[in-house]
Amino acid sequence: MNNDEKLDLILSEMKNMRDDITDIKLTLENVTNKNIQILAEGHQIINRRLDDAIKAESNIEMTRIKLNIIEEEIKKLKKAVGI
């Protein structure tokens, strides 16, 4: 194999590698990046729902505390009035 043939072989292999790299870049851009974006959007939705659930639970807890205080005050009033 002479030098020209070796050079042609090397250039051919380099072209194949460039084509492979282009395919990988396209896959990253068109598939992987879009899938990551879809997952990120899903996480944002889940985080919003979790925040809403935490706020609702906090409101429920505060309502229970207020109810407990009111019940105790009613007991004291009933006791004071003799009921």
Image (spheres, rainbow, N blue to C red):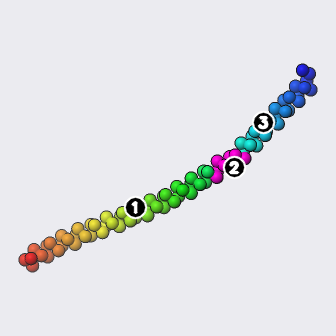
Q: CA distance from mark 2 to mark 1?
A: 36 Å
The residue to which callout 2 is attached is 29
- Of residue 64 and residue 32, the one placed in the foreground of this image is 32
Quarter that holds the C terminus: bottom left
**Residue 54, how many percent across, how many down?**
40, 61
The residue to which callout 1 is attached is 54
The residue to which callout 3 is attached is 17
Q: Which residues are magenta?
A: 26-34
Callout 2 amino acid: Glu
The residue located at (22%, 69%) in the rendering is 69
Q: Is residue 31 magenta?
A: yes
**Residue 60, how many percent across, how many down?**
33, 66
The residue located at (41%, 62%) in the rendering is 53
Q: Secondary structure at mark 3?
A: helix
Q: CA distance from mark 2 to mark 3?
A: 18 Å
Please name the predominant secondary structure of the magenta segment in the image: helix
The residue located at (46%, 61%) in the rendering is 49
Callout 3 amino acid: Met
Vertical side of 6 occupied by 45: above or below:
below
**Residue 81, how many percent across, how many down?**
9, 79
Callout 1 amino acid: Ile
The residue located at (80%, 36%) in the rendering is 16
